[in-house]
Amino acid sequence: MGRLACKMCDYNFMGSGFYVILVGIIGSVITISDVIRLMNSTSASQSPALFKPSGVVPIQVERDLKLMTSILGLEHYMFLVIAIVTEYPMLHVPWLLMQLVIIGAELFVFFVRVFIEGLHVTRDEIVFSLITLHNWLQVFCLFQWQTQSRVF
């Protein structure tokens, strides 16, 4: 897997600092709007609970967990921008690892769905997965380029 990703970085369009800054800024703006939406939501009707009928997870706990993950995501996106500005590649690692976990979870869910329901994939799911993988490769290639060109 690592060698395949490293070979992908040989192409000129992979590892663009401008693209990674754009991902960081867009991700930060979307995450900030999500945090503001979560902070302003007080009623249960705005945020449907995952286990609402049985009442397993209280609405306040669900809201707090969503808020924590959004703030963590904001931190990761800000690290992307700061890593480009300061040219310190280790700040890419939290975002890369979190996205790798998300990609792994998506693959796990995909294979479980294939074995249980059969192959039913929508166009939106394919586009979202390809964009996620492309963004991860862009940041990984920039990380690899920065670590190889930097003397520690």
Image: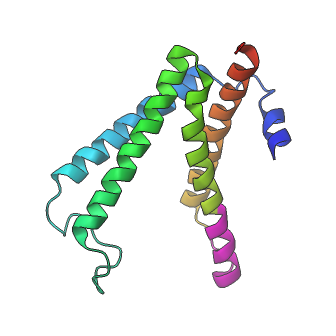
Q: Along the line of sight, which residue is nearer the eye, 36 or 79?
A: 79
Q: Describe residue 68's horizontal placement relative to residue 136 as left or right.
A: left
Quarter of the picture containing the C terminus is top right
- Vertical comparison of 144 with 4: above or below: above
- Vertical comparison of 137 with 133: above or below: above
Residue 100: x %, y % from top left: 63, 49
Residue 119 in sight: no
The residue under the point 48% across, 30% down is 79
How many numbered dots are placed on residues in this image? Answer: 0
Q: Describe residue 33's horizontal placement relative to residue 142 as left or right.
A: left
Residue 5: x %, y % from top left: 78, 39
The residue under the point 51% across, 29% down is 80
Quarter-of-image position of residue 59: bottom left
Q: Describe residue 89's horizontal placement relative to residue 32 as left or right.
A: right
Q: Along the line of sight, which residue is nearer the eye, 24 or 120?
A: 24
Q: Describe residue 78's horizontal placement relative to residue 56 as left or right.
A: right
The residue under the point 48% across, 25% down is 81
Q: Give the range drawn in magenta.
A: 107-120
Is most of the magenta stretch helix, strand or loop? helix
Residue 82 in sight: yes
- Vertical comparison of 117 with 140: above or below: below
Quarter-of-image position of residue 101: bottom right
Residue 50: x %, y % from top left: 35, 74
Inspect the magenta stretch and tell me whether residue 126 lies in it. Answer: no
Q: Which residue lies furthest to the front in this view?
A: 152
Residue 141: x %, y % from top left: 70, 30
Colour scheme used in the picture? rainbow
